[in-house]
Image: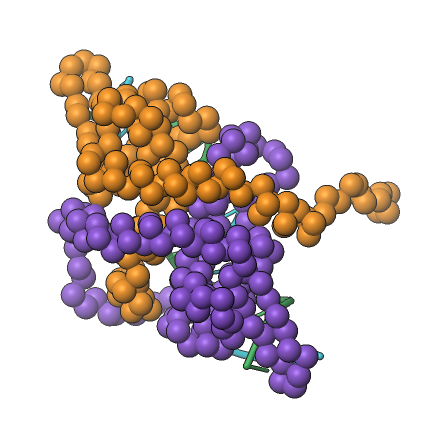
Chain colours: A purple, B orange, C cyan, D green
DNA sequence: CGGGATCCGTGGCGATACTG
DNA sequence: CAGTATCGCCACGGATCCCG
């Protein structure tokens, strides 16, 4: 979290964009927001989010959801049953952000190819090299 | 760079948004893009960018600019003089992205207060509590 | 003046294990 | 089923030195 105690970062407060990007720029946040946005006003359970996000660990999903909840972008509802069921949905604030995120997403889907291909010349693909020597 | 060796990232290619956020989410990128965007079609020199970005190191500014140039978002022009002068400007691609970034920036400036304040309640400032017990 | 190379600290993030 | 706690890796990013 970018929450320093106030020592050594005199420029951060003047740039809300950076604060925002610090949050939505984290690895799984954008994906969670997208999935919740696709559910519209509906709710999505923890396990389903995890199922739809291959490679995510419980820790990171939990952490991401907690951050979003703390930020007020996601609402959390718990059914006090055994076993418990937790549902997540985007708040109004979250939806208002999602609009802009969707625009960014559209841009990305259109132009990311140019970006990747532009840098692809420098990028070298190690064919295999799967030799776990020692570590 | 988000280019892992091929182990554990089977989902990345299907999410251009993540690729984009990996780039503009880096610490100084958004600020550079904003400054260059404010210059419109004009160019900005390295030293001036650095002067306008308190806290940035040459390495990071250099690295950021190189990434953006490689990505095709920024154009770089070198005057072969001594000492050399390097000018940067946004490309058309960069400008097209900036439109969406501006939208995101506007949202951030409007709502980042709610986000920070929402998380501020959890944030506790330990007043002192440094009881000198061991002396 | 611009920017590459190197060393190193910090923290994001993944894997595993345990609780309610 | 949902979430936390602990450990460890490694990429991001800062400081410094040096080169064109």
Quarter of the image for residue C15 reads: bottom left
For the point 28% across and 42% down, which residue is it? Answer: B97
Residue B79, position in %: x, y?
Answer: 16, 19
Q: Is residue B72 above or below residue A124?
A: above
Q: Is residue B13 left or right of residue A84?
A: left
Number of marks in the rendered image: 0
Residue B56, position in %: x, y?
Answer: 42, 30
Q: Is residue A45 above or below residue B57?
A: below
| Viewer-proximal residue among B114 and B57 | B114
Q: Is residue C3 left or right of residue B118?
A: left
Residue B135, position in %: x, y?
Answer: 86, 43
Q: Is residue A126 above or below residue B48?
A: below
Q: Is residue C1 left or right of residue A68?
A: left
Q: Is residue A13 visible?
A: yes
For the point 27% across and 50% down, which residue is it? Answer: A107
Q: Residue furthest top?
A: B82
Q: Is residue A27 visible?
A: no
Residue A119, position in %: x, y?
Answer: 18, 47
For the point 30% across and 28% down, which residue is it? Answer: B36
For the point 63% across and 73% down, which residue is it? Answer: A78
| Viewer-proximal residue among B54 and A25 | A25
């Amino acid at each position: 979290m970018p929450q320093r105690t106030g020592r050594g970062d005199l420029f951060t407060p003047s740039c809300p964009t950076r604060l925002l990007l610090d949050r939505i720029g984290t690895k799984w946040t954008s994906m969670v927001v997208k999935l919740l946005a696709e559910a519209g006003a509906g709710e999505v359970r923890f396990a389903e989010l995890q199922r739809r996000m291959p490679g995510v660990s419980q820790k990171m999903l939990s952490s991401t959801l907690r951050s979003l909840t703390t930020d007020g972008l996601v609402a959390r509802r718990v059914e006090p049953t055994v076993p418990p069921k937790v549902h997540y949905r985007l708040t109004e604030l979250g939806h208002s952000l999602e609009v802009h995120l969707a625009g960014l997403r559209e841009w990305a889907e259109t132009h990311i190819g140019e970006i990747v291909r532009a840098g692809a010349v420098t990028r070298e693909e190690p064919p295999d090299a799967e030799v776990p020597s020692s570590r």
